[in-house]
Image (cartoon, grey):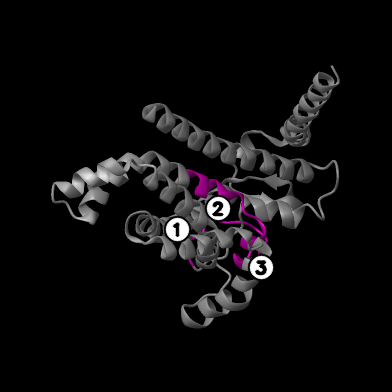
Amino acid sequence: MKRQIREAIIEKGLFLAASASIIIVMLIIIFMFAEGIRALNFDFLFGMEWWPSGEKFGIIPTVVSTFIIGLGALGIAIIIGIPCAIFLSEYSRDPIRSIIKSSVEMLVGIPSIVLGFFGLVVLVPLIRYNIGGLGESILAGWIILSIMTLPHIISISEDAMRAVPNSFREGSIALGSTTWQTTKALIIPNAKSGIFASIVLGMGNAIGETMAVLMVIGNPNIPWIPQSILDQVRVLTSTIVIEISYAIWGSMHQYSLFALGIVLFAVVSVLNLISRLIIKEEIRKRW
């Protein structure tokens, strides 16, 4: 009897612990929507000017800049990450694979503020004196964000490739195919859902990053749609961080910053949902 009571208490305690995260997330969402919903209107969603002192809160330049930074960083991460995942999965031996994968996964543990400081001290002057512009630019944001995105793409893509049954590799090689022919014709097509999911998750990470981006992209006072990769830009996350400190509580400026959070939350949620659907579909096909 005592054992049953103890098990019931443990079960309820674990249920409450699991429910706590859901409750916290829901409270955050409710608070964010309660504060930002009044700023969500046509002028906010499709306006071209963000000028708080003039009571103009259009987010198009900021949203465009956010996607430019995110997609550029993702492109660099894909170019480096997918070949790295292929090497780890199909070419490397266990000792080398363990060293490289451990090193890649250690990138996740580096605080974003440290990467941002590295970008500000090393990367920004390097761009300024060798390429041009002020250094704080889209290019600097691309490089720093791609470093932060690489672990997601490499780790998940490599896991997806290694999940392909070894019988596929053995059968292909037995027919005379090389390792690259086997990888190109069998491994990558069978792992494409996992690879795509890693890219979507990497995009969500790039769009939602704050501190590293804040330190290297310049953040002009009035956002604009950039014309060059050496231009300074303002993204959604940096706008919230910079302006929340002087926004008057209860003003339309404050409501608009919370509305930016709603937009950012919606974008990242959609990307996460897409990745989950892809992974579930992959699991369904395999079983």
Whether residue 220 is visible, yes or no, is no
Which region is colored magenta? 200-229
- x, y (%) of residue 95? 43, 64
Q: Amino acid at mark 2?
A: Ala
The quadrant the C terminus occupies is: top left
In the rendered image, the vertical position of residue 95 relative to residue 273, given as above or below: below
Q: Earlier in the sequence, mark 2 or mark 3?
A: 3
The residue where tag 2 is placed is: 206
The quadrant the N terminus occupies is: top right
Direction from residue 219 to residue 278 in the image, left or right: left
In the rendered image, the vertical position of residue 213 relative to residue 11, given as above or below: below
On residue 143, which mark appears? none
- x, y (%) of residue 144? 55, 64
**Dots 2 and 3: beta carbons under 8 Å?**
no
- Pointer 2 local density, CA inside 10 Å: few below 14, some 14–19, many at least 20: many
Q: For this rendering, which residue is in front, 194 or 241? A: 194
**Dots 3 and 1: beta carbons under 8 Å?**
no
The residue where tag 1 is placed is: 77
Describe the element under mark 3 as helix, strand or loop.
Answer: helix
Q: Earlier in the sequence, mark 3 or mark 1?
A: 1
**Dots 2 and 1: beta carbons under 8 Å?**
yes
Direction from residue 19 to residue 169 in the image, left or right: left
The residue where tag 3 is placed is: 114
State yes or no: residue 76 in magenta: no
- Pointer 3 local density, CA inside 10 Å: few below 14, some 14–19, many at least 20: few
Picture quadrant where residue 212 is located = bottom right
State yes or no: residue 225 in magenta: yes
Describe the element under mark 2 as helix, strand or loop.
Answer: helix
- Disc nearest the viewer among 2 and 3: 3
Picture quadrant where residue 58 is located = top right
